Image (spheres, helix red, strand yellow):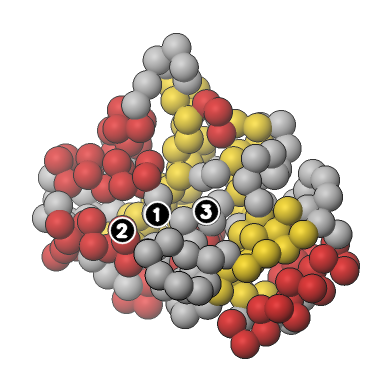
Amino acid sequence: MSKATLAREAVKLVKPGMVVGLGSGTTAREFIKALAEARIDGVVLVPTSVDSEILAQEVGLGNALRPMWAVDHVDLAVDGADEVTRDKLILKGRGGALLREKIVDYAAEMFVVLIEEHKLVERIPMASPVPIEVVPWAWRFVARRIEREFGGSARLRTGEGKLGPVVTDNGNYIVDWTPPGPLDASAEDRLKAVPGVVETGIFSKRRDAVVLVARRDGTILSF
C-alpha cells in the first residue's frame, strides 16, 4: 500500500471548519496533497515546518495556513513517524521538525500517526537515532553530558546542500543520540532535564494517538 493511499484514509477524518495540524516528512506531504484534492470548506491549517508550509502553498492551501500562535486549539493533527511501538511510544525527528511537531501534535484533540509496516517496531530506537534539538551555543556540552549520563554516542547532525550542521526552522542544532539500549517513556523527560536541550524526538505522552499502518498485504491496520 502506498503512502498516498494511507494519506487519503486520514483525510476522511477532516471535517469542515476543523483546525488541522500538518505534520512534516514524506508521508505528511502525501496527506497535504490529498487534503488539497479533497477541497474541504473552512479548514484552518497549522504547518509544523517550513517544508510543509511551502508545499501547502504550492497545492493551493495557502489561504488556510496559520501559525500556531494564531489558533486557540487544534482539532486534528496528522503526522508520520520514524518508529512506533505497539504501546504507542513514538520516535520522530529525522526530518528535523520535532519541536514544532511536538507542540502541534501534543496540543491536538486527536493525533493520527501514519506509518508503513516496517516502522512498527518492538522498541525504540531500532534503526534510527534519537534526534535531540539543542541550543547551538551549548551543543557540544549537551552532547557530552548526554553521553556521560545516559551512555551511547551523541553526534552533531550535519547537512546536505550546505557546509556545517543542520539548522532547524527554529535556529537550533540537532544532536543524534544512539543510546546503549532500548528506551522507555521516561527518557523523554529525563533528556529534557539536561540544560541546553530544547526538545527530543521521543513522543511518549500521546498514548491516545490513532496509528494507521499501511501493511504489506495492502490493508490498513489501525490501533
From mark 3 to mark 2, how far is it between C-alphas?
A: 15 Å
Residue at 37%, 21% (x, y): give it.
1
Q: Residue furthest front?
A: 163
Q: Earlier in the sequence, mark 3 or mark 2?
A: 2
Residue 202: x percent and y percent? 65, 55
Mark pair 3, 1: CA separation: 10 Å
> Which is in the foreground here, disc 3 or disc 2?
3
The image shows residue 17 at horizontal and vertical percentages of 23, 55
**Residue 10: image location, x then y, percent:** 35, 36
Q: CA distance from mark 2 to mark 1?
A: 6 Å
Q: Name the N-terminal-most of marks 2 and 1.
A: 1
Res. 172 in view? yes
Amino acid type of the residue that numbered disc 3 sits on in the rendered structure: Arg
Q: Which residue is mark 1?
A: 24
Dot 3: what SS? loop
* SS at badge 1: loop
Q: Which quadrant of the rendered structure holds the C terminus?
A: top right
Q: What kind of residue is marked 1?
A: Ser
The residue at 45%/77% (across/down) is 170
Dot 1, how many residues are within 10 Å of its Cα: few (below 14), some (14-19), or many (20+)? many
Mark 2 vs 1: CB contact within 8 A: yes
95 horizontally vs 92: left or right: left
> Type of residue at label 2?
Ser
Q: In the picture, residue 74 is in which quadrant?
A: bottom left
Q: Secondary structure at mark 2?
A: helix
Left or right: 187 as drawn, with respect to 113? right
Q: Residue at x 87, y 69 (%)?
A: 148
Q: Is residue 98 above or below residue 182?
A: below
Find disc 2 in the rendering and name its residue: 52
Identify the residue under disc 3: 94
Q: Is residue 219 above or below residue 212?
A: above
